[in-house]
Structure formats: structure tokens, C-alpha cells
């Protein structure tokens, strides 16, 4: 059985990496998620045991880990829907939805199906009513997140094309910090000061890194930024004869929650495209905030000939628990 990660408050991010730190809809969804988690982990229990861990993706896929009295663990999985309701049955508030089923997997990987999605055994009607409202709110919040993300993506694409053209026709030295691949011998991070002399374009501020691979390979990297910046980030080939504005160098991300509220979560990634030997690339951060002082970023840049290794395994010495590993 694959056990759930310890980091259970983060959504599995399947959107573009540029959307990681943004969106008011996402903030509202996270607040709702926290309250759902609090109720389920305090009052949730079924015949499969007491709820111990809870996880939800941006697509509304819910996973709950339950442990019974004998210590056997069961993984309960179902899809969040808009019409969850409950009935009081055997002193428990049992939540169901027409046409919706939960799949339960035990430690021997044997599966069963149940119409019970969640159950509250140690709650009252007020709490059950509140959970009903929260589930409905979360369903709408996820739709809002998707809509907001699509709107944000349109704006990002426009800004991205403008910046691509600028980067390919400027002297990048002084604006972007040159790093080697790898930048550290042991995959540890190194501190860099960015936004000392940010590039300003259409009301946005840009700073970042430039690197030239000595061999073909995939970029494996991670970084942590000041939380207040909430930056987007991209890669571009500086060769003006190449139009790579439509290329998504990053498609997925893993992350590790920060213990410092002043810092963002650690973003852990590998590139979707193989970088070419001798090409100079710019990896930039975009901020809508007027950055009036230099900002410290921590980052590690590594190069691998293959992208088969998961980022969690590649950086296992740095991060024992990586959420959304790929």
C-alpha cells in the first residue's frame, strides 16, 4: 500500500507552474480545505477506522487514511461532488451523494466499494451541517480556481511573449545572475540576491538566472522565494532565431511546505524539455509587486542526461517528504 504523505494541506497542483503562488480563489479554497480537514480528523470514523490523514487535489479527488482498532490502515478515495448530504445512522452522520461511490483499499491492496463517502461518529448535527456547507463551498471554490487560473493564464501568455522578445534582444548580463550547472556539488541550495536591478516591462518586474549547459540534459532544480513576491517563473532560450515562446519547459511541480511564513514553499522540479549544450537560457521570475529592495532566493540547479528519475528521489537527501512527486 502506498501511504499518504505527511503534508496533507496542499493541493496537488496540476496547473501551469506560473500559477503556483497566485489567485484569491485558491486562498479561499485553502481556507475551506483547512476547516474540512479539522472536522474530519477530529470527528471522522467509519467501520474502517478513525480518520488520520486527509488529502484533496485541485480536481476534487479526496483521499482519507483510516486506521482500525487492530492498526490496519485503509485508504478511502472518492470524488468531491456538488450534492453531498447526510443521514443519521447508528449514531453516525453518514454522507452520501447520488451516483457517487468511495473506493476502499486495505493493506493487502484489496478493494471494496461503498456508498458512504465520509462518516462523522463523534459529532453533532451542527457540525454535520457545517461540513455539508463546507463541501458545497469547496466544490464551487474549485470551479472558481479553474476559472481564475484560465484568466490568469491568458494574461501570463501575453506578458510571456513580450518578455521573450525583450530577452532575445538585450544584454542579459547585469539583469540576470549567471550560474553554472550544477551550481553546487552536493545538490544543496545556494543563496542568491535577485531584483537588484530588475527589468521592468508593462508594469511587471523581472529578475532571475542565466546558464549555459556544457552538455545536453534535463534541468533538476528547486528554489524558495520570499512569500510576499508570489512570483511566476519561466525559461527562455536567448537565441533570437528560435521562437520557443509556446514551449512549456515546465509542466509539473513538486513542493515542500515552508516552516517560515515569510518564505514560500520549496518548489521542486525537472524540466519538461531537454536543454541543449552550448545554448544560453534565462530562467526568470516575474513579480507584480514593485520590488524596491534586493530579495534573497535559495536555489539548486542540477543537470541530468535523463528525466526518468523522480525529483523526490533525486533530491531525497534535501527533502525526505516531497508532495506531488513526479
Image (tube, rainbow, N blue to C red):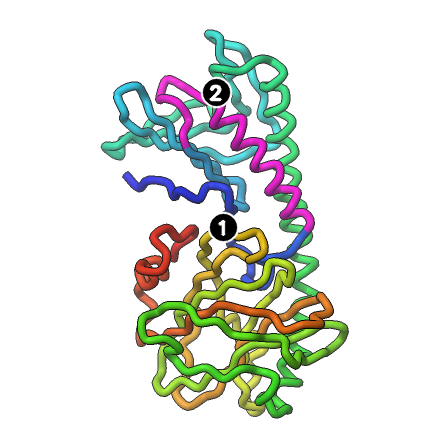
* Count of residue discs: 2
Disc 1 versus disc 2: distance between alpha carbons?
A: 32 Å
Determine whether 236 is above or below 154 in the image. below
271 vs 84, nearest the viewer: 271
In this rendering, position of residue 317 left or right of residue 253: left
SS at badge 2: strand
Q: What is the x, y in percent for residue 202?
A: 76, 75
Which residue appears farthest toward the top when viewing the image? 90
Q: Residue at x 44, y 86 (%)?
A: 212
Of the numbered discs 1 and 2, the one sitting upstream in the chain is 2
Q: What is the x, y in percent for residue 246?
A: 57, 74
Which residue appears farthest toward the right when viewing the image? 203
Q: Quadrant of the C terminus?
A: bottom left
Q: Which mark is residue 119?
A: 2
Question: Which residues make up the magenta segment?
Answer: 24-52
Considering the whole magenta stretch, tell me its main secondary structure: helix
Question: What is the crowding at mark 2: few (fewer than 14 residues within 10 Å), some, or many (at least 20)?
Answer: many
Q: Residue at x 60, y 13 (%)?
A: 125
Q: Which mark is residue 184?
A: none
Residue 37, magenta (yes or no): yes
The residue pinned by badge 1 equals: 259
Marks 1 and 2 in Cβ contact (< 8 Å): no
Amino acid at each position: 500500500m502506498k501511504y499518504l504523505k505527511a503534508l496533507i494541506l496542499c493541493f496537488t497542483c496540476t496547473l501551469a507552474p506560473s500559477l503556483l503562488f497566485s489567485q484569491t480563489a485558491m486562498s479561499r479554497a485553502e481556507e475551506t480545505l483547512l476547516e474540512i480537514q479539522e472536522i474530519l480528523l477530529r470527528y471522522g470514523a467509519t467501520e474502517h477506522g478513525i480518520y488520520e490523514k486527509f488529502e484533496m487535489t485541485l480536481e476534487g479527488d479526496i483521499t482519507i487514511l483510516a486506521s482500525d482498532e487492530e492498526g490496519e490502515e485503509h485508504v478511502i478515495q472518492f470524488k468531491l461532488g456538488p450534492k453531498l448530504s447526510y443521514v443519521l445512522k447508528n449514531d453516525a452522520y453518514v454522507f452520501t451523494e447520488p451516483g457517487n461511490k468511495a473506493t476502499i483499499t486495505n493493506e493487502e491492496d484489496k478493494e471494496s466499494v461503498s456508498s458512504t463517502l465520509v462518516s462523522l461518529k463523534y459529532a453533532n448535527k451542527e457540525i454535520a451541517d457545517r461540513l455539508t456547507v463546507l463541501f458545497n463551498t469547496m466544490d464551487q471554490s474549485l470551479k472558481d480556481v479553474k476559472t481564475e487560473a484560465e484568466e490568469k493564464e491568458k494574461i501570463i501568455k501575453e506578458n510571456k511573449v513580450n518578455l521573450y522578445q525583450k530577452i532575445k534582444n538585450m544584454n542579459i548580463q547585469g539583469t540576470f545572475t549567471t550560474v553554472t550547472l550544477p551550481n553546487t556539488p552536493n545538490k544543496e541550495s545556494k543563496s542568491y540576491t535577485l531584483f537588484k536591478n530588475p527589468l521592468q516591462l508593462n508594469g511587471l518586474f523581472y529578475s532571475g538566472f542565466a546558464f549555459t549547459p556544457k552538455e545536453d540534459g534535463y534541468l533538476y532544480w528547486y528554489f524558495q522565494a520570499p512569500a510576499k513576491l508570489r512570483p511566476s517563473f519561466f525559461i527562455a532560450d536567448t537565441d533570437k532565431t528560435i521562437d520557443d515562446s509556446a514551449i512549456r519547459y515546465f509542466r509539473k511541480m513538486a513542493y515542500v511546505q515552508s516552516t517560515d511564513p515569510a518564505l514560500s514553499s520549496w518548489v521542486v522540479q525537472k524540466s519538461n524539455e531537454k536543454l541543449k549544450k552550448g545554448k544560453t537560457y534565462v530562467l526568470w521570475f516575474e513579480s507584480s509587486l514593485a520590488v524596491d529592495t534586493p530579495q534573497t532566493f535559495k536555489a539548486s540547479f542540477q543537470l541530468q542526461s535523463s528525466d526518468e528519475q523522480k525529483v523526490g528521489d533525486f533530491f531525497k537527501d534535501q527533502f525526505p517528504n516531497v508532495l506531488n512527486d513526479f
